[in-house]
Image (cartoon, helix red, strand yellow):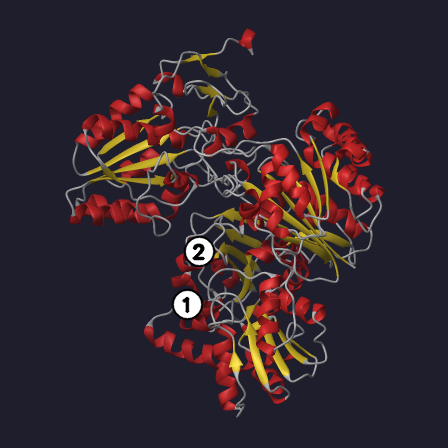
Amino acid sequence: MSLRIYCTGVGGQGTLLASRLLGEAALAAGLDPKVSETHGMAQRGGVVVSTVVLGDLKSPLISPGEADVILGFEALEAFRALDRGHAGTLVIANTAAIVPYPVATGQKQYPEVGRLMDLMAQQVGALLAFDAGALARRAGSPLAVNMVLLGALAATDTLPFPAESLLAAIRSCTNPKFLEANLKAFDYGAAAARDEGSWRRRPGG
Amino acid sequence: MSELLAGKKGERRLLLGNEAIVRGALEAGVALVTTYPGTPASEIGDRCYEISRQTDLYFEYSTNEKVALEVAAGAAAAGWRALCAMKHVGLNVAADTLMTLAYVGVKGGLVIVSADDPSLFSSQNEQDNRYYAKMAALPMLEPASPQEALEMTRAGFQLSEDLGLPVILRTTTRVNHTRGAVTLGVLGPRPGPGHFVKDPFRQVMVPAVARQAHARLLAAQGPARARAGASPFNKLTGSGPWGLVASGVSRNYVADTVQELGLADRVSFLSLGFTHPLPEDLMGRFLAQVEQVLVVEELEPYLEENLKAVAQARGFTGPIRGKGEGLFSRLYEYHPKLVKETIARHFGVAYEAPVAISPDAVLGVPLPDRPPNLCPGCPHRAMYYSVKMALKDLGLEGVFPTDIGCYTLGLLPPLSMADFLICMGSSISTAAGISRATDQQVVAFIGDSTFFHAGLPALANAVHQGHDFLLVILDNGTTAMTGSQPHPGVTLTPPGYPGRPIPLAGVVRGLGAEQVWVVNPFKFKDTLTATKEALAAAGVRVLISQAPCHLYEQRLTGKKRRGRFQVVDKCGECRHCLEYFGCPAMYLKPGAESPQMLIDHDLCSGCAFCVQWCECIRPVKKSEL
């Protein structure tokens, strides 16, 4: 068994916490996860990438074309991460956008999100795309996009451990103040994954 | 209670490589840890700081790496186990100490962590610090995973004591910043007081003493090599004719390649973890069973060159390859596919690499970048703006030697306030050299932590030699880029922080600078006036820009944002803030008929700087929020 999960987002979205939780859940399930992180650019608006590699593989890095799952915390970054994917990759993408500085100042254009999703759907094996930002806010914490995406991932039956392992990791590793909102966000994400309308391309479709 | 102090023997935890190093040191009973913050080593110091608040571990953020290593060396001379951690370029700063410490030796075990940075994710070069072990003739261990980082750190202390030499633990970013499964051992016994035994004719490196010491150091290489030969960290697996050699994270890529391409029966894999001295007998056994060798290592051909020397001595005449055209590069870090492709191509194994998708090609246009930027409310941006406006008003152009810290992000447009940067502290003396050789207006920028690290001798020199430039010290009250660690100039510190503050302005004046201005960069009018005065004067001029890092202050004091601001009038064709300021909270109204700037209230820090020079901006009333 080998599973390579590539997480990408903008600093402050909780990408590193998400990959850490996946790692903790995998460890508790008796697996040997490798989780790699990029540090330092979070508070300065840059892209933050982390990876979770499960199975016999020793490398924590994911090469271009080798990701089995791409978790995109932001629309443009999900699309940018396409170079890690292949025709069989499952992409779970937040359709909400965080405008980068060159766009905010009129130097570049942010591509239309709908078009990004359509193009992505043609390139990969499956695409689950929805507004995780809105779901996080509804759950009571705008910062819980990571929990929404984890809930969605757990509901796709891709992970080699049950959703309960992830929930246990969330309970033990996150701030108790936000636990209720986090668990709600997780559930909303799972619900989104079970909603036909969120799938722009179904696995095997 | 730090989670690194908890846990029973045999328990499995998901630890960051840096955390595993700390745990390994605690399991070896480390007494003292010193560091200067630097990515990718920073978490080692930060975790040790927390632990030092909860146990008798002594820890300090030293002013620079040379100081850090010397503090550790003194403790080790008195029999304490000590750890000193730094990034790779930090070892350059500590190199004077390192080279002769190898002669002086240690009593208590000393482990020196050198965290290298292939691909320079956060560094000014990607030097390969394995050569320091060779140059200093010191034992070196290279982990490839958090588990090995723990084991090697723990074992490193005993190894250091057995040989009487400091041990270098050489990591790369992929180990420091990877989380992996780690099996805990037992926390070591806490140390008692050390004792310095007087032995001056072995520990004072005057020439007569040093000659003996050098001979002893060379004599220690034999026992050190024997330890490498017997070390569980060096492994030879397989007996196939294709030889593969690797150390560090490259071992992971080789192992994955061998597994994924099914090469186990064709390969002999020499997987090295104790890499100075190298285990020559084991290398000889390896060579005896292979027909050809491919060395897989990031950056320099350290293993490759040493293996070739061993091969020559032992009569191996097969090809030994590593770096070169169609092989491995000396540039940047590797990744699994790159290693797989190169190994497959070299040995003629069929391998169809997955075709990577190109997002730019799929979209049809390049994707917009997401470059890092100074935060909204950053005092550096405010000071840069004042310097820009002062020079503009005076009709001058500046040359900007800069330094290392958050403020280096001033390189990017629209600020573009950086012209020359080599290393920590280079802003001051390179400013002196440039100014000496030209008639240009030279304005150097340095941060507060960088100033204490390397700026003191540089400023003393500038004053003494009568150089002529303006030095702007950007004092945001912390070592921000690496995670807000303290330094001697810091006055706002976490509760219980024991360090004594040394006011920066006093140091500057104490070094003889007579033309000194201290400004709050958020007070635009006063800062602009002071800057123009400073630019108009001659000789060494120091302008200290003092305002706290907004994020750090908020984290420590819980201070809420003071207010918000908004652009309420029409911008017309102005574009001033876009061309000279570049605050990330400011954006162009999408879909507007004519260009109109707006301020994003989620991002605005309420610093109230822009309102002082833009007539279109007003504070937003609380009732309107």
Identify the residue at image location x=47%, y=16%. Answer: B565
Residue B200, x across and y down, in percent: 41, 69
Helix, strand or loop at label 2? It is helix
On what subunit does the disc labeled 1 rest?
B
Residue A68, x across and y down, in percent: 71, 52
Residue assigned mark 2: B90
Residue A142 picture quarter: top right
Q: Which mark is residue B177?
A: none
Residue A105, x across and y down, in percent: 44, 29
Identify the residue at image location x=36%, y=17%. Answer: B572
Mark 1 is on which residue type? Met
3D distance between C-alphas at marks 1 and 2? 14 Å
**B274 is higher (above) or lower (below) than B425:** below
Residue B232, x across and y down, in percent: 67, 74
Which residue reaches farthest left? B439
Residue A144 at least partly seen:
no
Q: Cβ–Cβ below 8 Å for labels 1 and 2? A: no
